[in-house]
Image: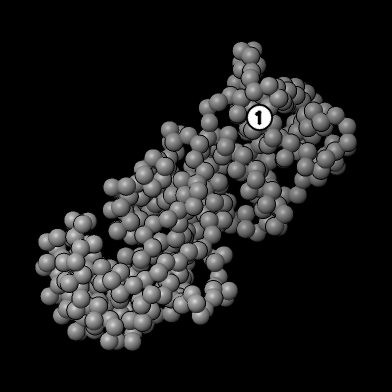
Amino acid sequence: MDTLKELLINTMPKYREKNEFLRYLYSEEFDILIEPMIIHFKNNAIFDDFNGKLQVHGRGSSRVEYKSLAKWLLDRSLLVGTSAVDELEAYINCKTFSAFNVLWLSNIQIDGTHKVGSKTYISSIKNLPNRKILKMLDKEGRELFDWVKPSSILMEEVVHTKNHYDQSKQSLDHFDFDLFSNSRLEVFRLLFSFHKRKSMQSIGFTTLFPDSIPDFNGISTSNGDIRNPDVVCEISGKDSIAVGKLYDSFINLSDKTQSKLIYVLRKINYYYSTYEIVERASQIRTLLEMLVLDDNPNGELVFNLSHRLARYFGEDKAERQDIVRITKKMYNIGSKAIHEGYLPEKKNQEFHECKQIIMTYIHRLVSDLLSGKQINWRDILIK
């Protein structure tokens, strides 16, 4: 690699002078500048992976040419000098390396980085483990994310298998793409929303390589879940510890309970993501049905719903009667919101009187489910 370092040293002064000019990178002058490096790559078999093969990057891949490798080396050397060659050599010789699944968040205020799982963190965008992408976000963040710029991230460290393959001769049937899914980070996001009783809004998901890994994919994102970018949520270290404990409880639940809770938690996040009363009222009605009427009981729905909640939470007859009254009122408000898309002033007032009480019951039910408690609603109503 000493020869490559010498070539890099000879090339850097000219590149440092002109690399800011986009037109230069597509010019004949640039091709002439990197030609000695291209010849060196062609004459050394250790660089064959960069000769038209596809580099796997998370759930995607992109074609890599010698010219792409030369540009990566030049860009990286602007930051670390000839150590860029050492980083390339380490990558060529490795079988696996650390990468990061990243969930981009739009409305979170956080200082520093907090651990929430064994290899999962919530962090300010300033601590993104890829300075090249961070610089790109500073310039083009709103365009990349439909005009909403990420403020923070949920990220998990994963072991990424190095894979450069010839599409005409090889397949990726053996590659574990499930590792590069947003499903685990989504659970953390929804648990943060549940814990804080505020919206946690994602604007996309991607897999990032650290700066020291040759990466030719740039940045691409899957769709997020953005509803109201003005809803702000502050996250502290204590919040992160609490959510980490909730996640530990969640992963010990049955698959059926996990699936149900993810849907419930998503609805709770939707509730906190809007100020629209009609939307909030309809979400509450849906949540009550999902949590309390999941066994499709016979008889009148409102009766079953209100009396089940009353039996579950009421300490005495007076409290149970109050729960029945409030639950019936809120369910009827939610029904009107769903069927008519409008609430008159009287219903608006009733909603504001009841919403906090009902949401407290919803949160307590979800907490019980997260703790592993089994709730048999048929038995509760009989007692």
Question: Residue 280: where, in percent of width, then height?
Answer: 60, 29
The C terminus lies in quadrant: top right
The N terminus lies in quadrant: bottom left
Question: Residue 79: where, in percent of width, then height?
Answer: 21, 64
Question: Residue 6: where, in percent of width, then height?
Answer: 15, 80
Q: Total label count?
A: 1
Q: Where is 81 relative to 341, above or below?
A: below
- The answer to whether residue 141 shows anywhere in this view is yes
In this image, 40 relative to 218: left or right? left
Place residue 313 in its image quadrant.
Answer: top right
Residue hosting label 1: 282
- The answer to whether residue 82 shows anywhere in this view is no
Q: Nearer the viewer, residue 39 or 231?
A: 39
Q: Nearer the viewer, residue 107 or 141?
A: 141
Q: Amino acid at mark 1?
A: Ser
Place residue 283 in its image quadrant.
Answer: top right
Q: Nearer the viewer, residue 148 or 128?
A: 148
Q: Where is 225 relative to 210, above or below?
A: above
User: As drawn, which residue projects farthest toward the front?
Assistant: 28
Look at 42% across and 66% down and name the residue there: 62
